Each structure stands twice: as structure tokens, then as C-alpha cells.
Amino acid sequence: MHRIRILISGLVLLSSSLFANDLPINTKLGGDFSLPSTLGKDTGIQAFKGKVVLLNFGFTHCPDVCPMVLNRMAQVMGAKAKFAETVVPVFITVDPERDTVAHLAEYLRFFHPGFVGFGGTQEALQAVAKQYGVVVIPSQSKSGSGVNFTHSDFIYLLDQNGRVRALYSQKDSIESIVNDVESLARK
Amino acid sequence: MSRVAVWVGRLVFAGLILAAWLNAVVSSAAEELKVDSAWVRLMPPVSDSSAGYVTLSNSSGVSMILVGASSDAAEKVEFHRVEQVDGLRSMKQVKSIELPPKGQFRFSPGADHIMLLGLKQPLKAETSIDIRFQFESGDVVSVPFQVRRQAIDNAGDSSGHHHH
């Protein structure tokens, strides 16, 4: 009886340590693509195989929300020293006309040196945004800010095989994202 | 005492009352406006725009209407509002903003913010720029904004410490 109890508590402990932070695989969103990147070549999620990816869609002519999200991604990257090796922050533009790959490289390295940016044609980027369930609505504003993009601003967590495992809104704490990234990164 | 002297006295008295009343009504915005946590976002040098945040408090008994802003650091300064519907964020320009009597208005990340468009040169960390606020009354108040990467109280920028 005693042994069984120990065995059961052992199993409970084992399963909780294995599965407590388990994140379901999102089979509806995501997938690979091939786009011009700041790595100097056309590539996609396959370039990060074996690494955890933090992914966000946005545009650089967005001085409020987008830098806020990029700062959050940088904060996650800085939370653990090993993330520099095991995690890649990725930004895909929804505004390819203004966000060339060269511009993206200049812009992104300000937030974190590990950032990889993707540009490309409007059509190709729209297809990728759709894959990830990102809604993008361009609007010509009368103000001096020019074209604006209404867009969803989730941070996507992708595992080492490029599968979407979680989406984070602005309400999710840095701490909770770091915990999830860590639980994936140790596998 | 002559009648003339009495009349002069009455006139002076009336004048004093009028002056006091005018002073109360047309008191300058600079005296009635309290400014807190004014900062502007440090952006990558390649960016030509940024956003500013501040809490403006109106200590007077009348509404203060903000109708515009300008800065030597940017070609244009506008007020913008972020609206969130179904996880989508959109931004629209706001032409005027009311500071209610004894009330305040907060420009904060992901909500209402001050857009600096056409930066004349990249902002530098640990420096400050002035933004001039124009009020409907004609008053103009210049406010120094600190250039920073993150919010001053670190509350508005990331919502990072909130748990849900």
C-alpha cells in the first residue's frame, strides 16, 4: 500500500514536471514560408529549426504599439542568458513598401541584436499573415502619419519545429511568456 | 468728504472686483496645468517618428481644451488614439482633448498618445525635448519630455506586471 502511494505520488510529480508547462500545439495557425530576410537570403521558419521562436507582425512606422511589443520581446530575450542561444525573436512586416529588408535590419537591431526581420511583396506577406491568422487592414490616414495598418499584435510562440504553441496579447505578463519559453527551450 | 472722492472710491473698488474676476476666469493655463511623467519614446535611429506620453492635470475650476501641439524636434505633432476591437488595434487622430475641471487626462502607451512626426534628428536617450501644448484659450504651455526606452513608472509600457 505504502509502495503504491509512493509510486502514485512519484508519477504525479513526474507528470506535473513534464506536463505542467505543456503548451498545446495549435494546428490551425502557422506554417512555413519563404520571404526575403535580414539574414541576407530568402528563408522562413525552417531557418530556426531547433530553436524556439517569438514571432510578431507589425510595421516600423508605428511609434506606439509596435515598439511596445518589440520591447516586450526584447525583455523576454533578456530574461535568461541562455535565450540568446536557444530563442530567436522574429518580426514580419505588414508594410513592405516602407519596410525594406535593409530598413528592417536597422530598425530591429535597436531592440535586440538577435532579431530577424522578414519583408517581401505585398501578396507574399499577406499570404503569411493569413497563415498566422493576422488581420491587416491598411488605412490612409488624413494625418501626417500616412498609411496606418490596423492589425492584430499578438506575440506567437513557436517551438523548435516551427509549430505555434501559444499566442500572447499585451495583457500577458513578461514573466508568463518567459516561463513558457523556458519550458519549451529545455526540451 | 466730497462726492467726487466717493465716486472715485466706488470706481476703484469696482475695478478691483472686475480685475479679480477676470483673473479667475482668464487665469493662465501654465498655472493651472500640472504635468506628470512626461516622456517620449526612444526609437531606432532609422525611425522618423516617435510617441510621447504624459499625464496632464487641470487644477482649475473650468475645462481646459487642448487643441494642438508642436515641437522644434518634429515637423508635426498630433494626438492619436489607439482603439482595440476584437484583438485588432487601430489608430485614429484626435483633434482636441478636454481636461475637465479638477480632472486629468493621461497619454499612455497603447492608448492615447502624442505622435511626433518627421523627427528632425534622431532622439537621444537621457536628453529631453520640449512639446508646446496649445489650448483653446490661446494659452501655450511648453513641457519638457524625457527621452526614454520605457515608461517612467514602467506601468504603462508593457502591462508586464499585471497577472490575469
Image (cartoon, rainbow, N blue to C red):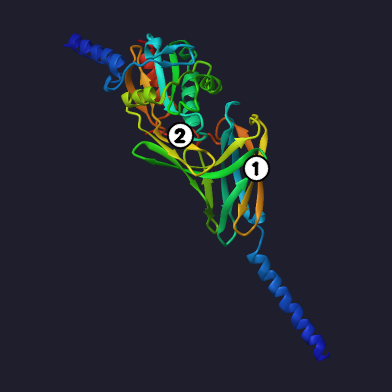
Observer-nearest of A68 and A62: A62
* Mark 2 neighbour class, 10 Å CA radius: few under 14, some 14 to 19, many 20 or more: some
Tag 2's secondary structure? Answer: loop
Q: In which quarter of the image is the C terminus of chain A?
A: top left
x 56%, y 21%: residue: A106
Residue A163: image x %, image y %?
A: 31, 17
Mark number displayed over residue B71: 1
Compute the Cα span from label 1 to label 2.
29 Å
x 58%, y 26%: residue: B44
- Image vertical order of residue A99 relative to residue B24, above or below: above
Specify the quadrant of the image occupied by residue A56: top left
> Quick check: A96 left or right of B35?
left
Amino acid carrying mark 1 in the image: Ser
Is residue B10 visible from the viewing direction of this image? yes
Residue A55: image x %, image y %?
A: 41, 22
Disc 2 marks which residue?
Answer: B159
Residue B50: image x %, image y %?
A: 57, 35
Tag 1's secondary structure? Answer: loop
Name the subunit of mark 2: B
Q: Which of marks 1 and 2 is nearer the N terminus?
A: 1
Q: How many marks?
A: 2
> Which residue appears farthest toward the right when viewing the image?
B1
